[in-house]
Amino acid sequence: MKLIRIFNRSIRDSFKSIFRNFSLSVASISCTVITLILVSLAILATENVTNMTEKIEHDLTMVVFVDSKASTEELKNIENELKAINNIDTITFRSKDEIKNNMSSENEAFKNIMDSWNEDENPLQSTYILKVKNIKEIKETAATIKNIDKVTLVKYGETMVDKMINTFDIIKKCCWVIVLALVLVTIFLITNTIKITIFSRRNEIGIMRLVGTSNSVIKLPYLFEGLLLGAFGSLIPILITIFGYTYFYEAMGGVIFSNLVELTKPSSIIFTTSLALFIIGAVVGMFASLRAVRKYLKI
């Protein structure tokens, strides 16, 4: 019961402190709102870049061209060797006759030329269309495939893929650095607010210590105060995240510039981002309060 009373009193005192130092509290909450909005933007950007990277990884195909004179047995051996490579996810075989028929059906000029070919005269190459598990290992995978007997060429858009992987990695790292920096700014702002509050109540705290109040009882209201400031500061960014991102997604039609760059659906991102903002606000507020209490009260 004593513990419950202490918690109830601490929560009550934290609310009183917030309203007693209303201008400072508003300033702290306002700064928290601004930084958490930026944190939200950084998280949303990171999630969308990650989603784009995963989509590219899923859709990327590697085309393996086989010698046109390869026998059925040699084609089977190539397929078995491809299956033995760990990074290969799916394998689709297209025979040179199938490729010939597809080309003939799509273009009348090709049809006139190709219809005169018999099976031995077909110069086209059979192909294996592959999807990989890890796009970052695609270069090593391609090098392994090139060494397979009767494989003449491996294509996957090497230059473009390498540039996209490097660009997306840099963007993701920059976004997470921004998130970390903004969290540190939020800690700094709330810490300073709590410091001023503590300084204005130093006489009250001194009396509490003189009458034997324990350090934990003195600290507790400030921890709750920091938690509340952070939690209140996260509410507006959460609303902006939910309604703002949903509006942006619908206005853009779910894509940026073209269908090649799809946005992450709101249902998959806004609630986890909102939860992250609330947790960041509350935890950062508590941490900032604890830091201020320890450093400036020396208790």
Image (cartoon, rainbow, N blue to C red):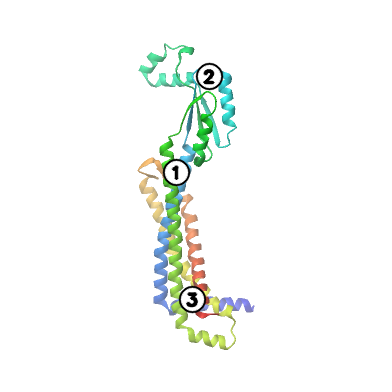
Per the image, label 1 sits on a secondary structure element best described as helix
- Name the spot of residue 17 as percent of width and height, x first: 47, 78
Q: Characterize the local packing of mark 1: few (<14), some (14-19) or many (20 or more) Cα atoms within 10 angstroms.
A: some
Contact between labelled residues 1 and 2, with CB atoms less than 8 Å apart = no
For marks 3 and 1, give the one nearer the viewer.
Answer: 1
- Which numbered disc flags the more N-terminal residue, 2 or 3? 3
Q: Name the residue under label 3.
A: 15
**Residue occupying the point 52% across, 86% down:** 206
Q: Residue at x 48, y 43 (%)?
A: 54
Q: Nearer the observer, disc 2 or disc 3?
A: 2
**Residue 212 placement (x, y as % from top left):** 60, 86
In the rendered image, which quarter is residue 4 located in? bottom right
How far is disc 2 from disc 3 in space, using C-alphas?
80 Å
Q: In this view, does 182 lie above or below 118?
A: below
Per the image, the residue denoted by label 2 is 70
* Quadrant housing the N terminus: bottom right
